[in-house]
Image: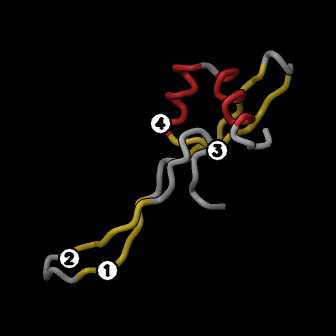
């Protein structure tokens, strides 16, 4: 599975590794993706989300119900 956050949409960034001799090779920075289980009280069930650390903070700030409603509005199947 690719390293994409379901909440924020964060994806890997790409760039160069630069050595001491200044040679450049391609590299990527992956977001900090966690698999988290949340309880949805309105449906009385648990859901699993692949979220970044920033996505966890967004869920803490807005609430799981609001985030799930936004994801469903965007067309994601939860």
Residue at mark 1 to residue at mark 4: CA–CA distance: 28 Å
> 1 left or right of 33?
right
| Dot label at residue 69 | none
Residue 19 percent coordinates (x, y): 20, 76
Q: Which residue is mark 1?
A: 25
Q: Mark 4 or mark 1, which is nearer the start of the sequence?
A: 1
Say which element carries label 1. strand
| Foreground disc of the pair 2, 3 | 3
Would you call the spot at circle 1 few (<14 residues within 10 Å), some (14-19), or many (20 or more)?
few
Q: Vertically, is 69 above or below 74?
A: above
* Residue sitting at x 77%, y 22%: 40
> 65 left or right of 44?
left
Label 2–label 1 contact, CB within 8 A = yes
Q: Vertically, is 71 above or below 43?
A: below
| Dot label at residue 19 | 2
Q: Which residue is mark 4?
A: 54
Say which element carries label 4. helix
Would you call the spot at circle 4 few (<14 residues within 10 Å), some (14-19), or many (20 or more)?
some
> 17 left or right of 63?
left
Q: Vertically, is 34 above or below 30?
A: above
> 60 left or right of 69?
left
Q: Mark 1 or mark 3, which is nearer the start of the sequence?
A: 1
Residue at mark 4 to residue at mark 2: CA–CA distance: 30 Å
Say which element carries label 2. loop
Residue at mark 3 to residue at mark 1: CA–CA distance: 29 Å
* Residue sitting at x 50%, y 49%: 10
Q: Which residue is mark 3?
A: 50
| Foreground disc of the pair 2, 1 | 1
Label 3–label 1 contact, CB within 8 A = no
Residue 67 percent coordinates (x, y): 64, 28
Relative depth, front residue between 76 and 56: 76
């Amino acid at each position: 599975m690719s390293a994409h956050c379901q909440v924020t949409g964060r994806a890997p960034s790409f760039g160069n590794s630069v050595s001491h001799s200044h040679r450049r090779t391609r590299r990527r920075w992956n977001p900090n993706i966690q698999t988290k289980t949340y309880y949805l009280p309105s449906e009385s069930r648990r859901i699993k989300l692949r979220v970044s650390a920033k996505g966890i903070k967004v869920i803490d700030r807005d609430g799981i119900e609001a985030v799930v409603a936004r994801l469903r509005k965007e067309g994601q199947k939860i």
